[in-house]
Image (cartoon, grey):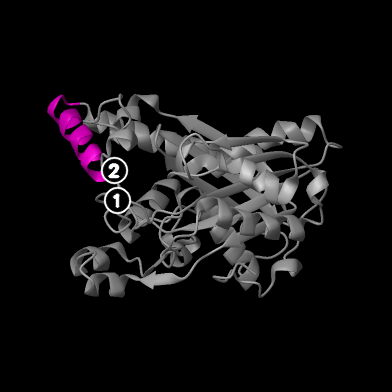
Amino acid sequence: MAGIGVFRPQTESVDAAVRQGLVSKEAADASGITGVSVAGDVSPAEIALIAARQALSSSGLSAYDIGLLLHTGVWHQGPDGWGPQYYLQRHLLGDDLLAVELRHGCNGTFSAMQLAVPYVKCAPHAGGVLITASDNFGTPLIDRWNPGEGLAYLGDGAGAVVLGSSPGFAELLSICTSTFSGMEEVHRAGEPLFPPGATTGTFLDYGARAARFQQRATDDGTWVQFLLGHQKHNVECVGQALHEAGVDAGDIKTVVIHSMPRQAAASYLKILGFSLERSTWEFSRTTGHLGAGDHLAALYHLLSTGEVGPGDNLLLCGSSPGVTYKAAVIRILDTAAFRNQEARPDGL
């Protein structure tokens, strides 16, 4: 991991959202989330470019050294029929590389890294891989303050990381994936497969979909099996990542997670054998769920604040619709370039 960059826009406090009637005081208190990053009318592609420039600069590589660009996001990136990766090519990298948009939910950055590994190993002299993740949820058809019961408020932002074969600020020791496709319906229950909801003006409410799925599974007696299977996939994926990295849970300094409400995060971490205090939840409660960018933003925060240092092992993990499970272990090598460089709204 040669370079990293993050764009975090201005934060809107949850207290302000309560005063505006956007969210109830009870729900806000229960979530524990204190702020949400809000980008206004700036597109995901534009903020991805800011993060990408920073990542490339900190990597020591040039645009000509990048042989593969993988861009990921959760929400709509721009005009239908258009690819944001080409915006990044035009304004930063040029045309002599493969550029692909990857749609894999909030685990998209993990999937991009997993695809980057064989490229770097098979073509070590072909340059690095630039991965970008970006979202702006300030649009119709979704309510950042009410994405669904048990989910974090949705924040805007972008992250970028450069992977290569030369030593960088961190080493990727392992990256693993698992899928529980029997639960794929949990994120679409009650919705038709065609035509797509985005083409009919259908509002996205993950909470309502999950509730319908749970009710049906409860009625037919399969809900407990789904819960146990969900936990099993989480635990096994993390266990595999730790094993392949040659470390155990006690060797992990910090667990980097998606932004989640306090209770959801605590329960998730407890299943994996970690406490809330050993995670990045205190940071993520200030940003909201940044789509596929949660882990890059939290990692950059750890580097810039000095909360991690050379030799520290970090576990990055999460799940997303599919249901997919991801886990990676990285070892920090050098933080000097990022010390006291916390991300600011101007992206500098």
Image coordinates of residue 71 in percent, x first then y, are 59, 42
Check if residue 211 falls in the magenta segment: yes
Q: Quadrant of residue 153?
A: bottom left
Counting residues from the N terminus, which is met first, the one under dot 1 or under dot 2?
Answer: 1
Which is more toward the observer, 208 or 157? Answer: 157
Question: Is disc 2 surrounded by few (<14), some (14 to 19) or many (20+) residues within 10 Å?
Answer: some
Q: Is residue 126 left or right of residue 290?
A: right
What residue span does the magenta drawing correspond to?
206-221
Image coordinates of residue 180 in percent, x first then y, are 40, 28
Residue at image coords 48%, 45%? 78
Image coordinates of residue 215 in percent, x first then y, are 16, 34
Residue at image coords 68%, 40%? 69
The disc at residue 147 is 1
Q: Is residue 160 left or right of residue 230?
A: right
Identify residue for label 2. Answer: 204
Mark 1: amino acid = Pro
Residue at image coords 76%, 59%? 57
Which is more toward the observer, 210 or 345? Answer: 345
Residue 333 shows in this picture: no
Check if residue 137 falls in the magenta segment: no
228 shown above or below 137 = above
